[in-house]
Image (cartoon, helix red, strand yellow):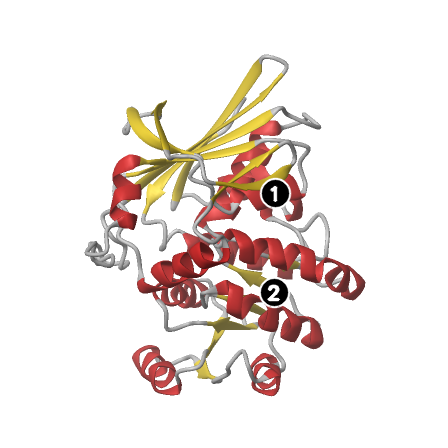
Amino acid sequence: MGTAAVVVYGATGHTGRFVVAELRRRGFAAVVSGRDTSRLEALAAEWGDVEVRPATVDDAGSLDRALAGAAAVINCAGPFAVTAGPVVEAALRAGIPYLDVAAELEANVATFAGHERAGAAAGTPVVPAMAFFGGLGDLLVTAAMGEWTSAEIAHVAYGLSSWHPTSGTRAAGRVSHERRAGRRVRFADGALRYHDDAVVEQDWAFPEPLGRRSVIAEFTMADAVTVPSHLAVPEVRTYMTVEAARDLAAEDTPAPEPADDLGRSDQTFVVDVVVASGGVERRATARGRDIYAVTAPLVVEALERVLSGRTRTTGVASAGAMFDAPDFLRALEPYVSVRLPH
């Protein structure tokens, strides 16, 4: 498995570079792909041991050539509303697993709805949102549920010390805003519901080191797609610390800058999950550094499990449905410190 070639589409982006580095660290042969040949070649020259295969999502033939002979593809190229569909279809044609790091809510809805039947028929794993947003929260909710078959509500609170968005994050946000016609969204009564209600702030008691913080209520992220895709939870609420939400909203917030030898920024995070059923609450928490950098061990750990057959289903499935959630979360040390219910 260590010599398996894995295509990273969108390899020259901020998150894509972390993913390529993590693949190389774990012994995979990385194939870098995307639309900008010159940037791909510069990346190859920097690392010296990656293959370059340019491709564009509007040219199915180029995608087929990029994926030829590969073990799997990881899509890191946003906006995923544009890239996910074509790259999933190319992966299914090639008969190889597809994983992506999409945080875009609508793009994830489209992946589940548009490829469920084809993925199941092909027997090929398709794992969308295998990232900080969507994947990590889904794993935490699944682990917190334990033996419960249902819960009344799942809360996913994101405590970010700051949020310096990448250009990709900003582009994806613009696409989502346009697709929603500026409306906000919540998952309630078992469905995504779009609305124009005013933004509400409240307090959330995060574990230390954050403590009690003001959060934006219903800061709805990909968890509203991944969690209910496989768990009987009719309401999923997500929250974001006010400081981070303001950073994201401000047009002059700079992109993240490396602050250690791994290229991570100095951003820290706590993801605090609470599930409730019949008056009983269960909590699971993850702590770490840099939401973009931590996506790399998340998606590459998922890749290793898919390629080694450590999966629970096939076709299109979220992280919590595809993998043993507690075991997966424990495997993320030292990138993520996790506390799960006893």
Q: Residue at x 49, y 44 (%)?
A: 136
Q: Between residue 44 and residue 63, name the one nearer to us.
A: 63
Residue at the image point whose x is 37% and y is 35% from the top: 199
Distance Cα–Cα, label 2 vs label 1: 16 Å
Q: Is residue 215 left or right of residue 254?
A: right
**Identity of the amino acid at label 1?**
Gly
Query: Badge 2, how many Cα within 10 Å: few under 14, some, many 20+?
Result: many
Q: Position of residue 236 (x, y in %)?
A: 55, 33
Q: Report the front residue among 52 and 250.
A: 250
Locate residue 319, reporting x and y percent. 59, 48
Figure quadrant of residue 108? bottom right
Residue 287 position in % (x across, y down): 37, 37
Determine whether 301 is above or below 204 in the image: below
Task: Find residue 330 and report its horizontal and vertical position in percent.
Answer: 50, 39
- Dot label at residue 157: none
Crowd tier of the residue under label 1, counting other residues whose Cα lies within 10 Å: few below 14, some 14–19, many 20 or above? many
Q: Indicate the amino acid at tag 2.
A: Tyr
Badge number at residue 320: 1
- Rendered position, 263 above or below 268: below
Which residue is located at x 46 percent, y 62 percent? 26
Q: Inspect this view and state whether residue 302 appears.
A: no
Task: Locate residue 202 relative to residue 238 in the image: left or right.
Answer: left
Q: Is residue 69 visible?
A: yes
Q: Quadrant of the N terminus?
A: bottom right
Question: Which residue is tagged 2?
Answer: 98
**What residue sits 52% from the left and 69% below the top?**
82
